[in-house]
Amino acid sequence: MLRRTLLAALAVAVPALAVQPAAAQQGVKIGLITTQSGPNAGLGRDMVDGFNLAIRHAGGRLGGAPTELIVGDDQFRPDAGKAMAERMVQRDRVDIVTGVIFSNIMLALSDTVLKDRRGVFLVSGNAGPSELAGKDCHPNFFAASWQNDNTHEAMGQHMTNAGIKRAYIMAPNYPAGRDALAGFKRFFKGEIAGEVYTQLGQTDYAAELAALRAARPDATYIFYPGGMGVAYIRQYSQLGLMPQVPLFAPSFTADQTILPGVGDAALGMFASTYWSESLGNPANQKFVADFEAAYNRIPSPYAAQSYDAAMLIDSALKATGGSIANKDAFRNALRAANFQSTRGPFKFNTNHFPIQNYYLTQIGKDEKGRLVNQMRGIIFSGHADAYASQCKMR
């Protein structure tokens, strides 16, 4: 369901920096499309809450401009996501579309947003399909997250460094799943004992796990976000596979949208990530503390990415005096990425995808006994995606 929230009402008496009065009155209208229903609704909830926290940190006005946020549910369906984008762009006349968790939904709606005559910007809060990083890159598309392959490339490198010889790899059969395993294979130098793609949204893995056990790999690498990850890890643990075949994953299969539902079965798992709730930079420490205070839970990467997307937009609006009217100026301000990211070092490559660090974490418990991703070191410093050379930015 579409709901409209005029977040300017949250404004406090904070002076707007470098805002021209006429531009500030114009305001900015943002459409946030995410998954708010079904087993992946928790991912969307974190995305909305992270974005709203950033607006509150900005005093209720991104870049000093009156800010209206329209939130829409893509229902975990590409056709619904596309219809929502059409509604926001054509009827609501938004200036920016953001959010979008799943890459099949991003690919379904990107043309609707990017081909609009008004020059609407699309700032991804999660999905980073290889097509938009490479041959289909666009001047008005920015990924405030990562390219789909990257966290998987990092784990491929770590498992190679760890001396693992045979890996069994699994992911859902959709664009991000295929990108995930392609990225893993790009850096894993051992043997692939099995490569399996399952139905998107599947939660029963009995047959696949029987085949995995029969293959006798040294380790398993999976990418299953949301409810898929909860189901997979539970079933993997119940079959007694954890001590026999260690399980590795990206953070999206071992984050705060999954760990509370999995419980202690996830203890000891390793994950690759660009962000963690335990990352120690000041921007992240403030974000994590304020998110938990506001929502009574630890944030996930979806919340952190969405927060960063909002702060990126805030930084660009500050640079343009609170106005998005001059598209070239606003685009250049987004490219500058002049904000303090929750993940630490952050800059854009020529294809408008991040160059950033990737870390190794291990699932442990914090002082309150809660499962968290504990930092174990850096896998890649300043890592860029593999598709930028294919991007011929117009």
Image (spheres, helix red, strand yellow):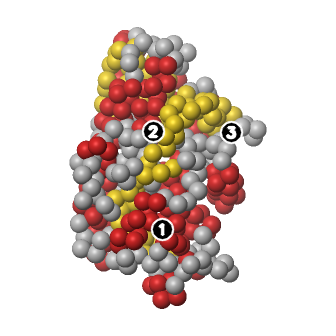
State the residue lying farthest toward the right.
367
The residue nearer to you, when weighing 1 against 337, is 337
* Image quadrant occupied by the N terminus: bottom left
User: Which type of secondary structure does the marked residue at label 1 adopt?
Assistant: helix
Q: Secondary structure at mark 2?
A: strand
Mark seen at residue 370: 3
Tag of residue 383: 2
Q: Are marks 2 and 1 in contact (CB under 8 Å)?
A: no
Q: Earlier in the sequence, mark 2 or mark 3?
A: 3
Residue drawn at 46 percent across, 60 percent down: 336
Spatial CA distance of label 3 from label 1 is 37 Å
Q: Does the image show residue 337?
A: yes
Q: Do we see residue 78 in this rendering?
A: no
User: Tag 3: residue type?
Assistant: Arg
Quadrant location of the C terminus in the rendered image: bottom left
On the rendered structure, is 366 left or right of 96? right
Question: Which of the 4 image quadrants contains residue 122?
Answer: bottom left
